[in-house]
Amino acid sequence: MRALIASRPKGSLPAVAEKIEYWTQHGRQTLYLLVSFLPVGDGRERAVEFFMPVGQSGQSQQWITASLRRLSLDARGGFLERALADMR
């Protein structure tokens, strides 16, 4: 988990999509988050990318986009556990 990933591997990576619903002062909001994984051996995978599909990131969701970019950079740098703890 703490190894640095110099660059994203070419091609597609296994990913999981999740539908998230939450409430704001504008009512119920829905978005989809995607997490891509890099196989690391022994059947294990490591999260390396966090993002929302294009077209979902409106002005009210910029904080989500920024948080996901940070998580992606931290995951590639080997600091994902600490970043998640800091975000709590």
Image (cartoon, helix red, strand yellow):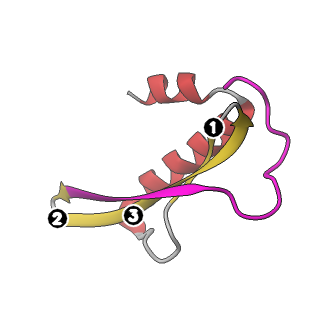
**In the rendered image, which residue does mark 2 sit on?**
28
Pair 2/3: label in front: 3
Residue 30, x across and y down, in percent: 28, 66
Q: CA distance from mark 1 to mark 2?
A: 32 Å
Count neighbours of disc 3 (C-alpha within 10 A) and say few if under 14, some if 14 to 19, many if 20 or more.
few
**Rendered residue at 24%/65% (across/down):** 29
Q: Is residue 86 magenta?
A: no
Residue 59 relative to residue 69: left or right: left
Residue 55 relative to residue 21: left or right: right
SS at mark 2?
strand
In this rendering, the answer to whether 61 lies above or below 80 is below
Q: Quadrant of the N terminus?
A: top right
Residue 85, x across and y down, in percent: 46, 23
In this view, the residue farthest toward the front is: 42
**In the rendered image, which residue does mark 1 sit on?**
46
* Residue nearer the viewer, 61 or 42: 42
- Give the residue type that dot 3 points to: Tyr
**Contact flag, marks 1 and 2 (Cβ < 8 Å):** no
In this rendering, the answer to whether 30 lies above or below 82 is below
Pair 1/2: label in front: 1
- Give the residue type that dot 1 points to: Arg
Residue 84 relative to residue 12: left or right: left
Q: CA distance from mark 2 to mark 3?
A: 14 Å
The answer to which of marks 1 and 2 sits earlier in the sequence is 2
* Residue nearer the viewer, 27 or 20: 20
Give the magenta-colored segment's residue range.
1-22
Residue 7, x across and y down, in percent: 83, 47
**Rendered residue at 41%/70% (across/down):** 58
SS at mark 1?
strand
Count the marks.
3
* Residue nearer the viewer, 45 or 52: 45
Q: Which mark is residue 32?
A: 3
